[in-house]
Image: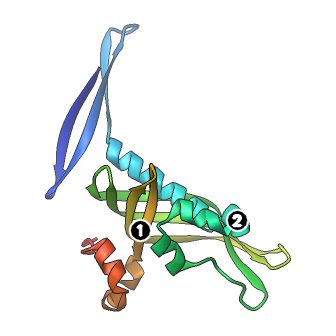
Amino acid sequence: MEIVGYKHIGNLQTKTVLIAMLATMWGMIMIGCVDTESEEVRTVIQKYESSWLSANVALNPTLKYDLATKQWADYMGIPTSHQGVSGLLTTSATVNDVTVIEYSSARLKAWACTTNTFDEITLQGTIVRSGTLSRCGTYVFWKMDANWKLAGYYNDADRRYWNHAPEWLKTVIGDLPNN
């Protein structure tokens, strides 16, 4: 049995699905709460973060267009070598926190914190070091060809430079959340 309800966080309304399950062995009813929008957004961000700087995309750069809009993908490009180091390759990503700001069938906007595990490699493929990178920021994804694609991201650490961001990025993201 599914019960669909809504919860309000500030002026944001998100759909919540309550699932009731009869545990006949003990004669109890257990109720679980799953915020379907938050979980979908978490999955979308995790997929993007774990794939964008992956070895697969580094070896097949056109795959970036499966993950992001053409405008964002071209703006970000693919990392190039710097002083003999090919760059960072993400080996995994975790979404630690997510707040859904907007959600529709065509657009989602969220603030999230992620931790990416990476290997820094040389042009020859030698791992120079491994580490983690944590960051928080605002993500905007658009649904295109039945896939969520990143249309824009802005790192919270760069908030003081928001006025210098490209106008198209400001249009895509809109107002930054107050986190």
Quarter of the image for residue 131 reads bottom right
Q: Is residue 86 above or below residue 107?
A: below
Q: Position of residue 34 (x, y in %)?
A: 34, 37
Q: Residue furthest left?
A: 11
Q: Position of residue 80 (x, y in %)?
A: 68, 83
Q: Position of residue 91 (x, y in %)?
A: 67, 61
Q: Which residue is mark 1?
A: 151
Check disc 2 and report its element: helix, strand or loop: loop
For the residues labelled 2 and 1, the Cα–Cα distance comes to 20 Å
Density class for disc 1 (Cα within 10 Å; few <14, some 14-19, many ≥20) is many
The amino acid type found where label 1 is placed reads: Ala
Q: Which residue is mark 2?
A: 60
Q: Position of residue 16 (x, y in %)?
A: 26, 39
**Residue under the point 58% across and 78% down:** 77
Q: Is residue 98 above or below residue 169?
A: above
Q: Nearer the viewer, residue 161 or 97?
A: 161
Check disc 1 and report its element: helix, strand or loop: strand
Q: What is the total number of numbered labels drawn onto the structure image?
A: 2
**Residue under the point 62% across and 62% down:** 63
Residue 105, label in figure: none
The answer to whether 175 appears left or right of 144 in the picture is: left
Q: Quadrant of the C terminus?
A: bottom left
Quarter of the image for residue 9 reads bottom left
Of the two numbered discs 2 and 1 on the same chain, state the one appearing first in sequence: 2
**Residue under the point 53% across and 55% down:** 47
Q: Are marks 2 and 1 in contact (CB under 8 Å)?
A: no
**Residue under the point 60% across and 60% down:** 51
The answer to whether 33 appears left or right of 91 in the picture is: left
